[in-house]
């Protein structure tokens, strides 16, 4: 499996495509020569028009590990060049140009090697798997975090995991099948925050995520968790500031954000 960026462009064939949310589509691609990927990595998709014009966009990978198939969830931006085609027009059997896997910072592996800067505790080196992992996602920012959860479950890893997921409505939850019942793992806890509409009988009134919600939902700073935070730029910057205010070491907070072009 590739643990670093791979510069090759490959051809992938769409083997599954179905709606994930009202505005997003889940796409599974079989990529010839795919070397496997680490949870948290991403890839580039390139579309080329008949006149030779091409557009490339990056998408987080929701799957991890060996094998030739990659799992994506693409949210459509109405003004985008690539995402509308992937969500509305792409068909099973279509071919796509794929570049990756890419990225080595926003990644998690079971029993990963310790990071000397972030893993020191009391003068000794602490294995990464000994530290709890806090995942925080907003909207489609949960996609790379799902890959981490899948990797965690597949390895039967005992690292304590928590996911705090902010989403507009129940219909907008990405990978609800993976997140149901805390992923079926006693070491995983999923906390959902609905900002516009909650399920019937939900005990909390829908509202934007707050500092107080973050404080009550995530591992405390005293547990020295590794934090992976992904979402829109505003969401990531706001939550990261709250985490630091709550005493979390900035070196232990890894962030990834998505912009408005897709």
Image: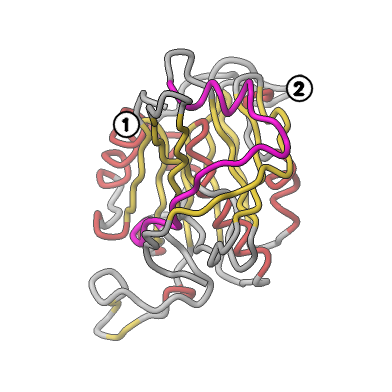
* Side (left or right) of 151 relative to 236: right
Q: Position of residue 23 (x, y in %)?
A: 60, 20
Task: Judge whether residue 89 is colored magenta.
Answer: yes
> Residue lying furthest front in this view?
51
According to the image, label 1 marks what residue? 233
Q: Residue at x 34, y 47 (%)?
A: 255
According to the image, label 2 marks what residue? 201
The 10 Å Cα crowd at callout 2, few under 14, some 14 to 19, many 20 or more, is: few
Q: Nearer the viewer, residue 217 or 129?
A: 129
Q: Which residues are magenta?
A: 81-106
The disc, 2 or 1, on the residue closer to the chain's N-terminal end is 2
Q: Nearer the viewer, residue 93 or 19?
A: 93
Per the image, label 2 sits on a secondary structure element best described as loop
Quadrant of the snapshot with the C terminus: top left
- Location of residue 64 with respect to 143 vertically, above or below: below
* Side (left or right) of 124 relative to 145: left
Q: Position of residue 211 (x, y in %)?
A: 37, 33
Query: Which of the 4 image quarters holds residue 19?
Result: top right
């Amino acid at each position: 499996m590739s643990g670093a960026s791979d510069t090759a462009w490959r051809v992938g064939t769409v083997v599954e495509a179905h709606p994930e949310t009202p505005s997003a589509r889940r796409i599974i691609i079989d990529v010839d020569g795919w070397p496997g990927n680490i949870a948290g990595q991403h890839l580039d998709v390139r579309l080329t028009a008949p006149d030779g014009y091409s557009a490339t966009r990056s998408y987080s990978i929701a799957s991890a590990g060996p094998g030739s198939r990659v799992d994506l969830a693409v949210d459509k931006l109405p003004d985008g060049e690539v995402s509308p085609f992937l969500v509305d027009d792409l068909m099973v059997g279509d071919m796509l140009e794929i570049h990756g896997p890419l990225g080595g910072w926003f990644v998690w592996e079971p029993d990963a090697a310790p990071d000397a800067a972030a893993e020191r505790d009391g003068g000794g080196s602490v294995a990464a798997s000994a530290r709890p992992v806090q995942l925080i996602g907003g909207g489609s920012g949960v996609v790379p975090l799902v890959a981490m959860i899948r990797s965690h479950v597949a390895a039967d890893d005992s690292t304590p995991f928590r996911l705090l997921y902010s989403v507009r409505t129940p219909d907008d939850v990405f990978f609800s099948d993976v997140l149901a019942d805390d992923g079926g793992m006693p070491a995983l806890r999923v906390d959902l925050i609905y900002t516009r509409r909650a399920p019937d009988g939900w005990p909390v009134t829908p509202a934007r995520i707050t500092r107080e919600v973050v404080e009550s939902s995530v591992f405390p700073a005293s547990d020295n968790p590794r934090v992976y935070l992904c979402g829109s730029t505003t969401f990531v910057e706001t939550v990261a500031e709250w985490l630091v205010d709550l005493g979390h070491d900035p070196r232990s907070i890894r962030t990834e954000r998505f912009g408005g072009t897709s």
